[in-house]
Image (tube, grey):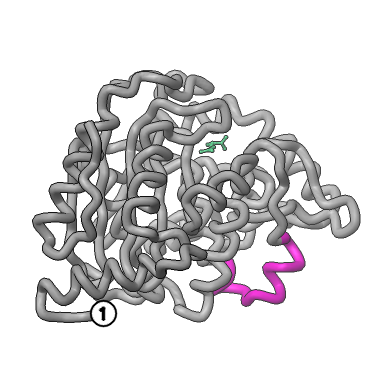
Amino acid sequence: MTISPAIPNTDAAFQAFLDELHQQYAPLSEGTVASYIPELTKVDPATFGICVVTRDGRVFEAGDTRHIFTIQSISKVFVYGMALQEHGRDYVLTRVGVEPTGDAFNAIVLDDRSMRPYNPMVNAGAIATTSLIKGDGPTERLNRMLDMFRGYIGHDIFVDMSVFMSERTTGHRNRGMAHLMRNFGMIDERIDESLDLYFQQCSVTVDCRDLAVMAATLGNHGKNPITGAQAVNQRYIRDILSVMHTCGMYDSAGEWVYRVGLPAKSGVSGGLIVVVPNQFGLAVFSPLLNAQGHSIRGLRVCEALSDHYGLHLFDSSMGCTRFVQQLGQSNGEVS
Ligand code: GLU
């Protein structure tokens, strides 16, 4: 099937485009579901959802957008925002850098000059940012973190206990990284408590629509477009989007920027979020992963959408602006 080349000038045209994308990529069966813990293997590989939430709160959905899964590494984006908000940019930079690694998400590697983890999107950096979450003891820290997620999602959320327990039981590599960082003073002495918090943040349950609302919140200066809640101070949005842009796709971050050109983050359970700044948030859920741990249908959908509407940040046709003007005008408004 070929996708008709048209800029959406109505909500219905854009919805039809998402439906076409879903139909086109649903038959793809390449890739494998994550298997490092048994819970993640139980998912139906055919599950596939696409959701877009615009800055003014319109929601477009295709496929299995209400299927629940654990957020996994996508959580790293939001916990990084929380660390920035609690400690400020300068302090957080002393604990975690902003350089892409070119290595896999779970590489045991620190910057050999500063001894910091390279960035907050790889596991080592994420454990370092999680360790910065304030609170008196594990329960208070967990509750504060869940409150932060609720601000982005707009409703109550939960930790999947069986995924959490499995992550905790099998997470030797993450444990090893935490101890290495403790050795260099990058995290404090609450090693096991912070690791539990990291495993819990990975085990927070969401659906594809939730992720699109979270991405749209980042694209809307930190303000949830559905509830109007300010989930994160807007001064940190540029830091968050910068590390998503350069580091969010791990060792394929360069290819991602080249092909899609938008800040993004993927998770091993099959979620992928993309932010089109000042425009909309996109989320795809499909658990079949490539060798780097990214959703294969997710990659295809994002590339097709970016190409079709010229959304790449460096696209000379300025598709981002054109997209919103046309979609906005059709509804009597321009964002
Ligand atoms: N819980 C996973 C880990 O820490 C997250 C990895 C991912 O989603 O990329 O290994």
Residue to which mark 1 is pinned:
335
Question: 196 or 229: which is nearer to us?
Answer: 229
Three-letter amino acid code at disc 1? Answer: Ser
Question: 244 or 268: which is nearer to us?
Answer: 244
Q: Secondary structure at mark 1?
A: loop
Question: 192 or 324: which is nearer to us?
Answer: 324
Q: What secondary structure do most residues of the magenta stretch adopt? A: helix
Count the numbered circles shown. 1
- When asked about the image quadrant of residue 303, the answer is top left
**Position of 10 relative to 34 (above/below):** below
Quarter of the image for the N terminus: give it: top left
Residue 328: in sight, yes or no?
A: yes
Q: Residue 265: x percent and y percent?
A: 48, 49
Q: Residue at x 26, y 79 (%)?
A: 335
> Magenta residues, as a range?
83-97
Q: Residue 110: x percent and y percent?
A: 80, 47
Q: Residue 51: x percent and y percent?
A: 25, 49
Circle 1 crowding by C-alpha within 10 Å: few under 14, some 14–19, many from 20 = few
Left or right for 14, reference 183 = left
Q: Residue at x 34, y 73 (%)?
A: 321
Left or right for 176, reference 333 = right
Q: Residue at x 11, y 72 (%)?
A: 330
Magenta span includes 88: yes
Q: Residue at x 49, y 72 (%)?
A: 237
**Ligand 1 image-quadrant field:** top right
